[in-house]
Amino acid sequence: MNLPLSDIIDRITILRLKIERTQSQDVKNELIECEKAVKEFENKGIKIKQEWFNELSKYNKDFWDQVIALKEAEENNDLEEMGKMYIRQRIANKKRVEVKNKITQETQTGFRSYKG
């Protein structure tokens, strides 16, 4: 897998969340490949921190929750609530990008993201 470490860890947390929340098993092979890719970084001497997984998991869960809440607000045509959910999504995504940038900086792999 030829992706930056921060993207792989982010993808792992999203895949785990998808399995947890939807009981979907169709992403298991992708999860296994991503986990192998992380091991390849470890084999190159890069220290992998559990805190990166924990932080990204937290922000991805928050983002997922906000997406669901936004859909509900849309269905109810609640514009005020939609605005709140949109802002919360942006905050969660900004924090997610900050963690990915921290991984990039600490491991000197990949490129800095400027989203958010």
Image (spheres, grey):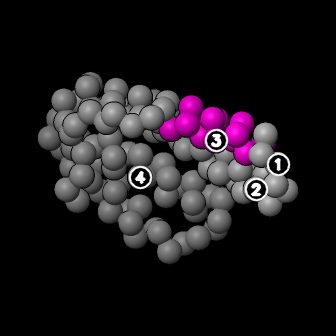
Three-letter amino acid code at the position of disc 4: Arg
Q: Marks 1 and 2: in contact by CB < 8 Å?
A: yes
Nearer the viewer's eye, disc 4 or disc 2?
2
What is the residue that sits farthest to the bottom in this orientation?
Answer: 26
Sooner in the amino-acid sequence: mark 1 or mark 4:
4
Q: Is residue 13 above or below residue 101?
A: below
Residue sitting at x 62%, y 58%: 20
**Residue 113 seen in render:** yes
Residue denoted by label 3: 86
**Between marks 4 and 2, how big is the CA–CA gap?**
27 Å
Secondary structure type for disc 2 = helix
* Residue at 50 percent of width and 53 percent of height: 14
Mark 2 or mark 4, which is nearer the start of the sequence?
Answer: 4
Is label 1 in contact with label 4 (beta carbons under 8 Å)? no
Disc 3 is placed on an element classified as helix
Q: Are marks 3 and 4 in contact (CB under 8 Å)?
A: no
**Neighbours of disc 2 within 10 Å: few (<14), some (14-19), many (20+):** few
Query: Which stretch did the figure color magenta?
Result: 81-93
- Give the numbered dot on residue 78: 1
Q: Marks 3 and 4: which is nearer the front?
A: 3
In contact (CB < 8 Å): disc 4 and disc 2: no
**Callout 3 amino acid:** Tyr
Q: Nearer the viewer, residue 73 or 41?
A: 73
Task: Name the chief secondary structure element in magenta.
Answer: helix
The crowding category of the residue bearing disc 3, from other C-alpha atoms within 10 Å (few below 14, some 14 to 19, many at least 20), is some
Mark 4: give few (<14), some (14-19) or many (20+) Cα within 10 Å: many
Q: What residue is shown with label 2?
A: 74
Of mark 3 and mark 1, the one earlier in the sequence is 1
Circle 1 — which element?
A: loop
Q: Is residue 78 magenta?
A: no
The quarter in which the N terminus is drawn is bottom left
Q: Amino acid at mark 1?
A: Asp
